[in-house]
Amino acid sequence: MIEPIKEYLLALQHQICQSLIEIDGKTVFQEDEWQRAEGGGGRSRLLTQGAVFEQAGINFSHVYGQQLPASATAQRPELAGCSFEAIGVSLVIHPQNPYVPTSHANVRFFRAQKPGHAPVWWFGGGFDLTPYYGFEEDVVHWHRTAKAACDPFGKEIYARFKRQCDDYFFLKHRQEPRGVGGLFFDDLNEWGFESSFAFMRSVGDHYLLAYLPIVEKRRHMSYGQREREFQLYRRGRYVEFNLLYDRGTLFGLQSGGRTESILMSLPPLVSWRYNWQPEENTPESRLYKLFLQVKEWV
């Protein structure tokens, strides 16, 4: 099972990095290969202070151990105490220009086994978009591409995984979506290995198709201090979600993963303001009223 998945994921990481370098045109990725004491390791790539991207982290990891962390068994308590193997690519891109949205994607495979029992396995992943200034055509393009990734597997699949994304990327303590959603799937094994693996590849392959046209369209828009300050403020929501709710962050930390690689998803600069509210009839209030709402985009 693992070798074809590993081959695909390493190629996906390389492809995404090369595409970002070509768009950015200023800097390249720093690469770190690391080993995990309990078993496995990974390859982390980080781009910082680029012309387009303030920070972009694209991680590959392949780890294994004798006991699944609590974050992995919270949804499946019957797997507590299982040995495990996990492999995946995870990325977060924080742009310089506030008119370019932040994006996140990951695709992953898990295998778990109790002594004397057959192993169980599943795929997971998805991608989601977090704009600072909303453009309906960008969000529609994002969701149309997400739908295109799903449609070969059934006309109901996009709606199912879009709904799961809306539910997952939600800041409960603020009663607010993190962004405009996308796709989120987990525990996927019901279609059998080949079809489940093909779906994971489809999601991975459609990420750049969804994100890069938006980057190209917005990267040259002029902005000032006001837009930059709002971008840094909204990045605070991203930090809150990653540290409070994100299962991938929790899994990495609980499983003894490399801390620097896990937390490279956080933005390099961020700000918080006490009880701040946007002024009425401003582009900032438009984000809240028209885009930070769960709705059907396609």
Image: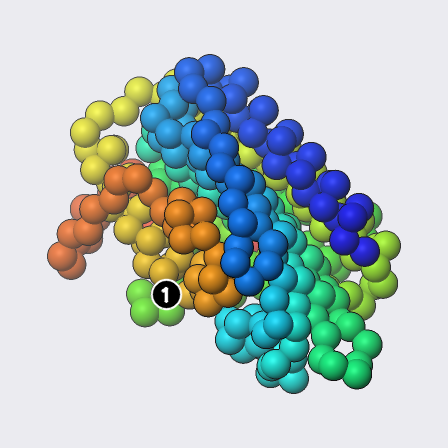
Numbered circles on residues, count: 1
Q: What residue is drawn where x is 47% and y is 43%?
A: 92
In this rendering, position of residue 56 left or right of residue 85: left
Q: Is residue 121 above or below residue 288?
A: below
Q: What residue is drawn where x is 52% and y is 58%?
A: 37
Under mark 1, the amino acid is Leu
Residue reaching furthest top?
25
Q: What residue is drawn where x is 45% and y is 52%?
A: 258
Decide if residue 27 is in sight here.
yes
Q: Is residue 293 above or below residue 152?
A: below
- Judge by depth and name the residue closer to the eye, 7 or 17: 7
Q: Whole-percent x and y of residue 243?
A: 36, 60
Question: What secondary structure is found at the residue carrying circle 1?
Answer: helix
Q: Whole-percent x and y of residue 226?
A: 19, 33
Residue picked out by circle 1:
244
Q: Whole-percent x and y of residue 225?
A: 19, 29
